[in-house]
Image (spheres, grey):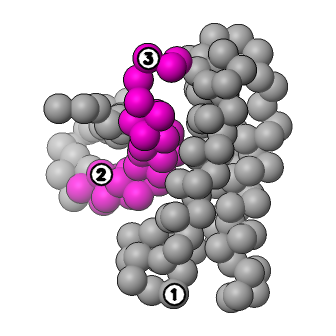
Amino acid sequence: MSSLRRPRAVVDYFAQAIAQVPVTGTPAEIGAARDAAVQEMLAANPAVVNYLRRAVLNPVRPEGHLLKRLTELARREVTDLRATGFASTTRPESSQVIDVMVRQLGHLFLQPMLDAMWRQLAEPGATAADKPVLEVRARRA
């Protein structure tokens, strides 16, 4: 990825992963399938993950507009799903977009921190099944 094209390339990775998922099933099933497609894409592209961590967690850098582009992609997808009846229209669109972003990126940013704490704190004899797995979601107050 060239430095000038990175934000666009990263957004394209997300768009392509999401586009692979057929729009069939319930809204929850579609959302889960899209989240899974994004997670698979991220697992297959560690350079994208590293770039996202730098660009999104430090938005004052030149790549800071990446978060804006990804949020706009999520907004377009949510708008399309709402228009076709595959997403709820009872909640504000803004809440749905934020939910998508938190589900797709929250684990990416926070699970490594949880893993590091687990390595430090795991008691003798603890197994992988004992390790906490992050569950990320956003909710309105």
Q: Position of residue 113 (x, y in %)?
A: 31, 58
Along the line of sight, the residue nearer the viewer: 30 or 124: 30
Q: Earlier in the sequence, mark 1 or mark 3?
A: 1
How far apart marks 1 and 3 lie (CA) works out to 37 Å
How far apart marks 1 and 2 lie (CA) works out to 28 Å
Where is residue 132, by image quadrant?
Answer: top left
Q: Quadrant of the N terminus?
A: bottom right
Q: Which mark is residue 90?
A: 3
Q: Is residue 30 visible?
A: no
Along the line of sight, the residue nearer the viewer: 58 or 86: 86
Q: Amino acid at mark 3?
A: Thr
Where is residue 20, by image quadrant?
Answer: top right
Residue at image coords 22%, 46%:
122
Which of discs 1 and 3 lies nearer the camera? The answer is 3
Magenta residues span 88-117
Which of discs 1 and 2 lies nearer the camera? The answer is 1
Q: Earlier in the sequence, mark 3 or mark 2?
A: 3
Q: Position of residue 50 (x, y in %)?
A: 55, 71
How far apart marks 3 and 2 lie (CA) works out to 34 Å
- Give the SS element for disc 2: helix
Residue at image coords 24%, 56%:
117
Where does label 2 land, which residue? Answer: 114
Q: Amino acid at mark 2?
A: Leu
